[in-house]
Each structure stands twice: as structure tokens, then as C-alpha cells.
Amino acid sequence: MTNGSKPASGEDALIARYFKPLATDPGAFGLVDDAAILRAAGEDIVLTTDAVVEGVHYLASDPPDTIARKALRVNLSDLAAKGAVPAGFLLTLALRKAEDDWLQPFADALGEDAVHFGCPLLGGDTVSTPGPQMISITAFGRVPTGRMVGRTGARPGDRVMVTGTIGDAALGLDILEGGAAASALASDQDERELLIGRYRVPQPRNALALAIRESANAAMDVSDGLAGDLAKLCTASGVSAVIEAAKVPLSAPAAALVARGTVGIETLLSGGDDYEVLCTVPEERCEAIRAAARAAGVAMAAIGSIVADGTPSRFVDAAGRELALKRLSYSHF
């Protein structure tokens, strides 16, 4: 993503108009170079990248400001789960057309989130595509040397904890696509908007990054579905987990839809796009991370325990009976 003081092409003009104002970090060089500098001193740089693709991660009808926020926030969610403080990001845009009525709100929202989360634009690229549209972001974070929280540290006896509520985004997408949730909530606009908002604009838990780093043995963000992502974490750590399904935190509309039989709990456990933090915490550190969550205004629930029996992780009902989940998570392939 480069441009000179006198744009020589349509791409240069696009960058200068919409994205140069976002590149306020000195290491971005005002986007006049084809590289940037991210300074590090006595710390590790955590890297993560995620792309959002039209028709896969967002709908063509979604507002451009929500698309921008989702593109950045799904990466910020990864940094939060690693215990990392945001340091900056690179942006790649693949566009069918360069239209002001799409690009301006996109850039405005991206700039607002960059400031809010302390994650400035450092550079990137813009390309044309016949479709679908795609936005890819690579984000960088900082942690003290050797302190990144990975997936491999879960230990038997750890409590499994999760932030926020699970399954709302899957229901929001169902509403946008005219599914069962749309019909069930046809007369409740507030609940519809709450769930749609959870799908379109994730709430990354960066306010808890330090607490996660200080208290969690292992962590990851929930992007593809709680059940599937838990399985990934347990596989990486060589452990298993027993999760009490009744303790998985649900929003009021999600709980009501399950109670009415509109959706099953499996839909919420495997739906994806939650972008909450899933972590395992030693018993003696649970109250510390709960206190940090309360101070940050973030809900946090203990939903089960890590075990060492070598069997696949399982979800059980209130009577201890295992729930048979046919689908654990969203998969691209």
C-alpha cells in the first residue's frame, strides 16, 4: 500500500484519500513506502492474520462500516486470546469497484476502531477482483518475552472458562438469511438487532489481555464454534475436557429460542463467529480472572474442567449424560 504526494494511479489516489489518514504511526511512513517498521524492545511480537470474504464471513448487503469493524476485530480477538497488546495491522483489500459510498464509511469505521483499540494501520495492498470482495488483515501484538498464551498449556484440573455469550452470531446470521430465528423473533426488533449486531460486529476482549496472560494456562478465541475450538485446544495440549452444557453462557434471546425448541443447543455450540475467549485457568487463579473481567465489564463463566482421560472432549447435560453433537464447528472445506 504505497502512494506518493501526487497520486499517479487510481490505486494511489484511493490509498491517499481513504487510508493515508489512518496511517498515523511513524513506522507507516505515511504509506509512501512499500514496507513499514514495527519497533520491538525486550518483547515478543505476536502475529495473526484473518481474511473475511463476501458471502462467507459477511453478506453483500451488510453495511460497509460493519464489514470494516469485523475485519479488524476478528484479528484483535486473536491477539486478546494470546494475552497480547495490539501494535498495528496490515490491510489488503480486493475490490470489484472503487466506490466512495462504500469506501468512505468503510475507512471511517476502520479508522475509529484503529484508534479505539490502539492498533494503527501500518500498510497493505489494494487490488481489483471480479469477485467476491475480500478483506485480509494481518495484525501485530506485543507480549513480554516468552509470555504469549498458546493452545498447548492446558493442564488437568484447570477450569474451562469463556467470556461473553455463545451462539448469538449464528442466530444473527440465521435472522439475516430468513431462518427459524427470524420467524420466531419477527415481532421483537430489539432482540433481532442484538443478535444481528453480534454477527456483524464482534466484541474482541482486548481489555482482558493482561488478565489472560497472568491467569490462563491456555487460550484461544472462539471463531469456528465453541465445541470445535475446544477440541482444537485440547488436542494441542494433549488433554480432554468435560463441559456442562447448562453452564455455557447464553444471551436472553438465545436461551429463549432454545427453550422454545426453535434451535437446538448444538446450533449455538457449533455455529461460530462468537469471537469470545476460551481459556483454561488453574483453580487458584479463577477468582483473579473473574475479578478482572468484572472490572472490564465483561461476563466470564466457568463451564467445565480439563481432564486427562484421553477421550474426546464431551458436553454433558444436567444429569451428566453426554450430548451427542453431530457437528462441532464451522469448516471452510
Image: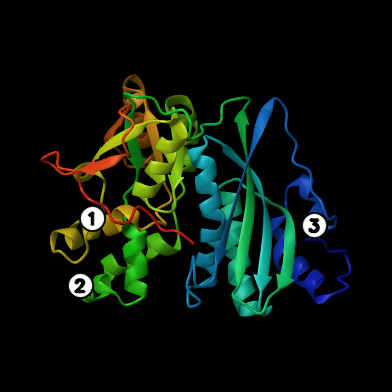
Whether tag 3 and tag 1 are in contact, CB under 8 A, the answer is no
Classify mark 2: helix, strand or loop: helix
Q: Earlier in the sequence, mark 3 or mark 2?
A: 3
- Rendered view: 300 above or below 323: above
Q: How many marks?
A: 3
Q: Earlier in the sequence, mark 2 or mark 1?
A: 2
Q: How far apart are the alpha carbons under marks 3 and 2?
A: 49 Å
Residue 103 percent across, percent down from the top left: 63, 72
Q: Give the structural element (helix, strand or loop) at label 1.
A: helix
User: Looking at this rendering, what residue extends furthest in the top direction?
Assistant: 284
Could you tell me how far apart the alpha carbons at marks 2 and 1 are, in whole angstroms?
16 Å
Q: Position of residue 169 (x, y in %)?
A: 37, 60
How far apart are the alpha carbons under marks 3 and 1? Answer: 47 Å
Report which residue position mark 3 lands on.
Answer: 31
Above or below, comparing residue 127 to residue 152 in the picture: below
Which quarter of the image is occupied by the N terminus?
bottom right
Q: Which residue is mark 2?
A: 184
What is the quadrant of residue 188 in the picture? bottom left
**Is label 3 in a helix, a strand or a loop?**
helix
Q: In the image, what residue type sits under mark 2? A: Ala
Provide the residue designation for mark 1.
265
